[in-house]
Image: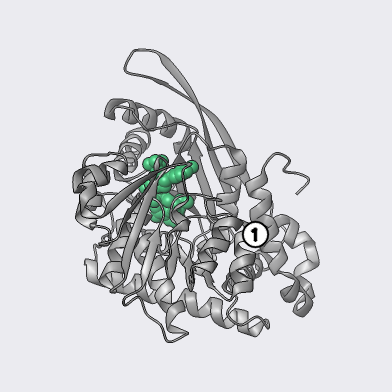
Amino acid sequence: LGRSPGEPEFQQAVREVLESLGRVIAKHPHYLEHALIERICEPERQIIFRVPWVDDQGSVQINRGFRVQFNSALGPYKGGIRFHPSVNLGIIKFLGFEQTFKNALTGMPIGGGKGGSDFDPRGRSDGEIMRFCQSFMIELHRHIGEYIDVPAGDIGVGGREIGYMFGCYKRLTNRYEAGVLTGKALFYGGSRARTEATGYGNTYFVRAMLATRGLSFEDKTVVVSGSGNVATYSVEKVQSFGGKVVAVSDSSGYVVDEDGIDLALLKEVKQIRHGRIADYVALKGETHGALFVKSGEGSIWDIPCDVAMPSATQNELTGKDAKTLVANGVVAVGEGANMPCTPEAIRIFEHAGVMFGPGKAANAGGVATSALEMQQNASRDSWTFDKTEARLSEIMRAIHDTCASTAEEYGAPGNYVLGANIAGFVRVAEAMRALGVI
Ligand code: NDP
């Protein structure tokens, strides 16, 4: 960790994994040989580059681009690209490190990587977004490929951005290499159910956790933070399983709707109007039971619920929030986002006996479906929605069962954090041992 000063999120992610490894090392001390643990914590390659672009006023803007190719023992690097002003090297390293174990947990042949830029897409015109994506790809294209590194979307990068990046890659390389990016639109090589996969997958994971105690989503009250890709499709799936989602948020605040979030209205506000979450209340009308609370004037986690699904960003659910949730009787938490709960919050959930699905397991449905997209691209095939969702549901069930059985094997039944960290680590470590010191 001393090698990564000033990277608190990366240190937090590494510490969490290392803390889980004591039991596996005690049983299998050979994992201490050949500096395997030190190698697993060090990215194979980190690329940092200048991204110059011209805004609508004709001024030149400069952003910084990153791609951290963390570990390729199991397959080509795979992980999303994030456009958000908070992006820096430490954030991308933490995400790439988590991604390595998450991808291993899916059981699919994909290594771990992550990328992004401190570019803020909010308020930018379509032309500005396109020029930025093209400039970003002018550098990135040298480092990616179907057998090298396959980026996807993340915060601030959806189907539109992937399209602009793919178009630029195609022109620069003169190759129609569909498998170089995932999260593409259906008509040029995308997979059905990829858009929905992370939110759906987290919901499947939580459903499997609830089932271990004879519970289900039926009549449960659920709070989902965020209102982007992961949050929206979590709301959709929870509702289809009979749960009632009463709150969603964005960085400006949160909305409570005691009638249950109106999914069509949420999609209208976020996907069609690209508005703020307060618009939900404005459109529904305050007299109809919906209320907007501004950021800083309360926490979405103050709302009593049975299930919490943090799906916005890292460290958004603190120890204080966890205490409130426990006091209000929460029974399960599924991390839709990457590392949304602070270490203190996780400890509080563990001590209170709350079922806790860590992001690297619970939100792995997105990358798993990206791997299914790669599979379809490689075989020039396109599966139906039902077939793809059925595969996603099987994969999430398998991830849940692997985490649960690993936790049990290592003497901590019900501890999905330990189960996910150990199962992910063992798969990557075995591949690294087989490949030698390289
Ligand atoms: P989106 O950009 O679609 O949505 C992000 C949502 O979170 C928005 O509502 C946004 O609000 C909110 N948000 C982002 N940053 C902050 C912040 N600093 N404070 C408060 N709210 C914030 O992203 P996704 O839904 O794709 O990603 C959400 C999380 O899920 C991330 O942690 C991502 O890494 C993780 N994830 C995503 C996967 C995917 O397939 N998309 C796969 C696995 C994990 P606002 O619009 O106001 O910024």
In the displayed structure, would residue 361 be above or below residue 319? below
Q: Residues within 10 Å of mark 1 (few under 14, many from 20)?
A: some
In the displayed structure, would residue 68 be above or below residue 341? above
Q: Amino acid at mark 1?
A: Glu
Query: Which quadrant of the view contains residue 17?
Result: bottom right
Rendered residue at 35%/49% (across/down): 228
Task: Depth check: give the residue in front, 319 or 11.
Answer: 319
Circle 1 — which element? helix
Rendered residue at 28%/54% (across/down): 190
List the residue tagged with mark 1.
Answer: 344
Rendered residue at 28%/74% (across/down): 242
Residue 278, position in %: x, y?
Answer: 30, 42
In the displayed structure, would residue 59 be above or below residue 188? above
Q: Taking the image as drawn, is residue 9 in sight?
A: yes
Task: Depth check: give the residue in front, 406 or 41.
Answer: 406
Q: Taking the image as drawn, is residue 143 in sight?
A: no
Residue 123, position in %: x, y?
Answer: 34, 29
Query: Which quadrant of the view contains residue 379?
Result: bottom left
Residue 2, position in %: x, y?
Answer: 78, 46
Q: Is residue 288 left or right of residue 291?
A: left
Quadrant position of the C terminus in the picture: bottom right
Q: Is residue 235 left or right of residue 47?
A: left
